[in-house]
């Protein structure tokens, strides 16, 4: 048998500033050519393991190491970040943080230029890497002008120019639309087989990664490996649920029907899974679950009429978009990267001025209102927390908006503490923001807007980078605000389960045009809409079809309502 390309032996690591180890007694072998998915809740130690593999620990993050780690025959602690970069190519969650060059070609060539290779060889390697990740037509483009999926490909190309042995992905799907995420997984799989590399993926979106085969799923919990199994085995256990990791939706639906899933039925993929042993139980469950109750109509709070916008004056990014939002609605805005979702939110908040059209708040035209005036009623949480954070300390950051508005200091502290408790950030109240993880910074940016108590809250990818527990905490908190205060919430999202589970309606944008305004389940059971808008049909659709249930929309709605009822019972809400 081949020697492992990555091997942890009784490995532990404690960051210098911490009292306890972040990862403890890790024993893990990864073999050449394997594709491994590492999953676990935030803070479990996943990213720490990644930093150990690529040499960032101890090269950039110092601390105490016990045990041994070997990666491609090297000790990362001795080889350092530069030495490990020859063996391990890392693609980060935040692709913008990886770009160096002014053009795609320059960015791909960066590592080669550092090695002072002959220009001819650099050109040849850049062309080969660009073809490998399908960006050969983008070489003259600026990386910052690309879509999320294109940026991901360029980042991947940037590490492939060195012919690395290991590809390490840190949440590669966090900022991608469903269809682009699907294609990213396909590309990773293609490169794996063409180049005989070893792939390690750290990701919360487990079902999306399982679109293509993985050899093993390594589950990390509280700094230890709690499971290391083939997907078919792991999906039949309770490990994911116990660790707060969202299992594939079709797996949950079959369990709700009272079934015990067998590994022999190959549950890794719904397309190839043997459904026959579970079909009748799923059909009975579907018949027994009551239909979703429709919400009563309320007054209109936001109206968008014939809205159009162009950045350059020649090509519309949005064209004649019209819709109305009722008070207390939770609405998702979905579509592929670059469809105009964030632009629409920016127009509503007053960051840009429409080319044509009007926006009404409670029936009043808000075009004369400044950004600050709109901010009194409309709160906006941006996709990247780094774009919002301006204060060094967490308490200062969350209270900044109140302080600027002249709210008394004691009231600021009271409201900030209350919001931090709700958002799960209270234990970090005295921390510098720079010491927080990406997911924690995301919650800080949400808290800084929630503390303002807006009438309408717009969130751009509120759950990107969050594990299932924190995702659920944030979304349940938003749902509670919606339920108790009547807060109107609009969410730009790539998370189709979020759209299904938490929103009443979906606005689907495609190339700047509103192509659908309907129930979320209707969107994800319409193959035409899903394909054009770069969405992905839910696996509940495929399960319903395989169980001979024709009303896939109703099946999806009942599943969501059933899970919502379970959560309410757990919280004691009737």
Image (cartoon, helix red, strand yellow):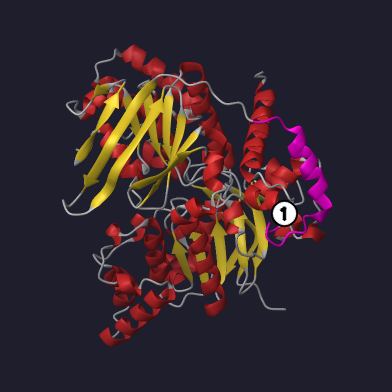
Q: In terms of depth relative to the viewer, which is nearer, 53 or 13?
A: 53
Look at the picture and state if 119 lies above or below 527. Answer: below
Look at the picture and state if 341 lies above or below 328. Answer: below
Judge from the rendering whether residue 249 lies leftward or rightward of residue 130; answer left or right: right
Instruction: Give the image location of residue 416, x and y in percent.
Output: 40, 21
Quadrant location of residue 378? top left
Tell me the residue at 67%/65% (across/down): 215
Tell me the residue at 26%/63% (across/down): 142
Instruction: Give the image location of residue 113, x and y in percent.
Output: 29, 76
| Residue 298 covered by magenta stretch | no
Q: Which segment did they paint magenta?
A: 268-291
Helix, strand or loop for disc 1: helix
Instruction: Give the image location of residue 492, x and y in percent.
Output: 41, 41
- List the residue tagged with mark 1: 546
Give the residue at the far front of this rendering: 550
Q: In terms of depth relative to the viewer, which is nearer, 554 or 6?
A: 554
Q: Residues within 10 Å of mark 1 (few under 14, many from 20)?
A: some
| Residue 288 covered by magenta stretch | yes
């Amino acid at each position: 048998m081949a020697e492992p390309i990555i091997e942890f032996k009784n490995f532990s690591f404690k960051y210098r500033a911490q009292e306890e180890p972040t990862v403890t007694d890790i024993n893990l072998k990864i073999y050449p050519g394997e594709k491994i998915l590492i999953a676990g809740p935030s803070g479990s130690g996943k990213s720490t393991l990644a930093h150990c593999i690529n040499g960032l620990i101890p090269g950039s993050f110092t601390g105490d190491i016990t045990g041994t780690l070997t990666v491609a025959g090297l000790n990362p602690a001795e080889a350092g970040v530069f030495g490990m970069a020859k063996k391990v190519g890392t693609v980060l969650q935040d692709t913008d943080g990886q770009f160096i060059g002014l053009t795609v070609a320059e960015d791909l060539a960066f590592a080669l230029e550092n090695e002072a290779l002959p220009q001819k060889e650099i050109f040849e390697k850049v062309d080969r890497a660009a073809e490998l990740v399908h960006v050969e037509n983008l070489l003259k483009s600026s990386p910052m002008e690309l879509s999320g999926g294109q940026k991901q490909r360029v980042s991947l190309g940037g590490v492939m120019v060195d012919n690395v042995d290991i590809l390490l992905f840190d949440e590669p799907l966090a900022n991608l639309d469903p269809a682009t995420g699907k294609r990213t997984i396909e590309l990773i799989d293609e490169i794996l087989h063409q180049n005989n590399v070893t792939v390690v993926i750290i990701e919360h979106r487990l079902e999306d990664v399982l679109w293509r085969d993985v050899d093993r799923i390594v589950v990390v919990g509280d700094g230890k490996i709690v499971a290391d199994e083939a997907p078919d085995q792991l999906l039949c256990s309770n490990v994911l649920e116990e660790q707060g990791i969202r299992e594939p939706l079709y797996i949950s639906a079959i369990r709700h029907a009272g079934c015990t899933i067998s590994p022999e039925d190959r549950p890794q993929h719904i397309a190839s899974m043997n459904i026959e042993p579970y079909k009748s139980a799923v059909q009975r469950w579907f018949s027994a679950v009551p239909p979703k109750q429709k919400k009563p109509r309320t007054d209109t709070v936001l109206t968008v009429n014939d809205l159009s916008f162009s950045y350059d004056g020649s090509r519309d990014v949005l064209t004649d978009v019209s819709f109305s939002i009722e008070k207390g609605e939770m609405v998702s805005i979905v579509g592929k990267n670059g469809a105009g979702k964030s632009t629409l939110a920016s127009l509503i908040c007053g960051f840009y001025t429409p080319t044509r059209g009007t926006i009404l708040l409670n029936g009043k035209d808000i075009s004369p209102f400044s950004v600050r005036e709109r901010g009194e009623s409309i709160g906006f949480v941006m996709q990247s927390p780094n774009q919002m954070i301006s204060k060094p300390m967490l308490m200062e950051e969350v209270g900044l908006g109140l302080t600027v508005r002249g709210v008394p200091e004691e009231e600021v502290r009271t409201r900030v503490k209350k919001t931090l408790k709700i958002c799960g950030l209270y234990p970090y109240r005295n921390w510098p923001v720079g010491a927080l993880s990406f997911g924690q910074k995301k919650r800080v940016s949400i808290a800084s807007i929630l503390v303002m108590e807006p009438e309408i809250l717009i969130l751009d990818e509120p759950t990107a980078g969050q594990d299932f527990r924190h995702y659920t905490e944030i979304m349940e908190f938003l749902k509670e605000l919606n339920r108790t205060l009547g807060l109107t919430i609009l969410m730009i999202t790539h998370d189709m389960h979020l759209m299904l589970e938490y929103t009443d309606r979906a606005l689907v944008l495609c190339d700047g045009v509103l192509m659908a305004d309907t129930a979320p389940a209707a969107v994800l059971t319409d193959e035409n809409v899903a394909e054009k808008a770069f969405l992905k049909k839910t696996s509940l659709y495929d399960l319903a079809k395989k169980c001979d249930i024709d009303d896939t929309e109703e099946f999806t709605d009942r599943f969501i309502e059933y899970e919502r009822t379970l959560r309410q019972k757990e919280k004691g809400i009737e």
